[in-house]
Image (spheres, grey):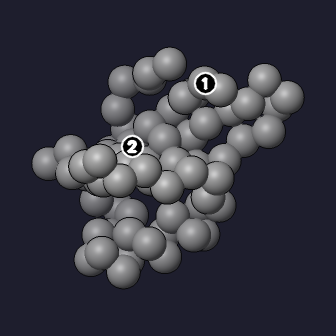
Amino acid sequence: MKVVGAMQTPDGRWRVEVVRHQSGGRWYRLVHGDNVVDFLTIGRVAELLAEAGVDMSDLSETARAS
């Protein structure tokens, strides 16, 4: 697995990562503190962030990580 992109809130409390598997499959990972939720669709990421009171438009791109 490799993180190929990421976005986060200005305070860094919420992070969304785009993860690519060796097989070519992609999914999203939501990170909040020690909590990590994997294998999400972008729709589900938006739902979870909205439930937490975070607007997707508040996210900004971060440096790529591996």
Residue in front for this viewpoint, 63 or 20: 20
Query: Residue reaching furthest bottom?
Result: 51
When the figure is inspected, residue 63 is found, relative to residue 60, above or below; the finding is: above
**Quarter where residue 7 is shown:** top left
Separation (CA) of disc 1 from disc 2: 15 Å
Give the SS element for disc 2. Answer: strand
Q: Where residue 63 sits: x, y (%)?
A: 37, 24
Instruction: Give the mark, 1 or 2, whose residue is nearer the N terminus.
Output: 1
Left/right of residue 23 with respect to residue 13 in the rendered view: right
Q: SS for tag 1?
A: strand
Residue 20: x %, y % from top left: 68, 32
Say which quarter of the image contains residue 48.
bottom left
Q: Is residue 46 left or right of residue 52?
A: right
Which of the labelled discs sits on residue 7, or is there none? Answer: 2
Is 42 above or below relative to 31? below
Indicate left or right for 30 with 8 as reference.
right
- Residue 10 at x, y = what percent? 18, 48
Per the image, the residue denoted by label 1 is: 2
Q: Nearer the viewer, mark 1 or mark 2?
A: 1
Does the rendering let one see residue 59?
no
Amino acid tagged 1 = Lys
Identify whether 63 is placed above or below 45: above
- Residue drawn where x is 73% and y is 30% of the image: 21
Name of the residue lying farthest toward the left: 11
Q: Is residue 38 left or right of residue 46?
A: right
Q: Quadrant of the N terminus?
A: top right
